[in-house]
Image (spheres, rainbow, N blue to C red):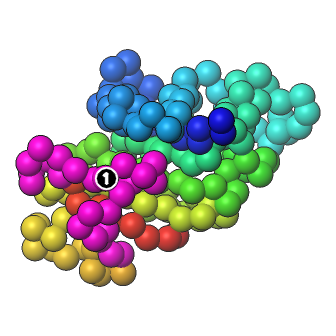
Amino acid sequence: MSTPPVILLLSGSLRNSSSNESVLRTAQAVAPAHVRTVLHAGPAALPHFNPDDDTDPLPAPVAELRAAIGAAAAVLICTPEYAGTLPGSFKNLLDWTVGGTEICDKPVAWVNAAAAGRGRGAEATLRTVLGRRGHRGVGLCERPGGPGDGRTGRGDHRRRGARRAPRGARTAAGTPLRGSSRERRPPFRTGCA
């Protein structure tokens, strides 16, 4: 029997019981049996990034992070936006990936748990940082009324050159995108950095 693929779940929030962690725990709960999900402990344990410390032996939390990324088939991120960008602690986590190659060529996606119209700064920063790390593509999942939702009238998904997943599309884990009602079924926008 083959080993199930691992999807590493990274929360950008330090807050206990944050909505971002709740979204990732929900993804964990609904993941199909043939996929294993691992929720990373988060950025709180990581030391401040210093290139001088990015040598062997790595600080233990950094070595654990890189090993978790390396063992994963894909990464799913859910992070808040603070002051128009990523939280400093999550940017620090991403900075620790610079000295390694674990995240390069790795499929990375994120889900936006922010209120409608929020989270664009974090999205832009993620796209920039991950694009420089050589990941294979970024997908953004938003709920109805969020930026890029065709029903908002803003047409963000068309301006950015992104396209929506077709009806009947499946997640990276192979499960159908579905919800109990149209309002619960999130529209998906994908694109590459």
Residue 25 spot, x, y in % from top left = 37, 28
Q: Residue at x 89, y 37 (%)?
A: 55
Q: Residue at x 23, y 60 (%)?
A: 187
Residue 20 in view, yes or no = no
* Residue 52 is covered by the magenta coloring: no
Residue range (magenta): 162-185
Rendering quarter of residue 123: bottom left
| Res 140 seen here | yes
Q: Quadrant of the N terminus?
A: top right
For numbered disc 1, what is the local secondary structure? loop
Image check: 79 left or right of 103?
A: left
From the image, give the main secondary structure of the stretch colored magenta.
loop
Q: Which residue is mark 1?
A: 176
- Pick out the residue farthest to the top: 16
Residue, x 38% and y 23% (percent of image)?
15
Q: Nearer the viewer, residue 89 or 8?
A: 8
Question: x, y percentage for residue 130?
Answer: 58, 58
The three-letter code of the residue at mark 1 reads Pro
In the visual, does 54 lie left or right of 166?
Answer: right
Q: How many marks?
A: 1
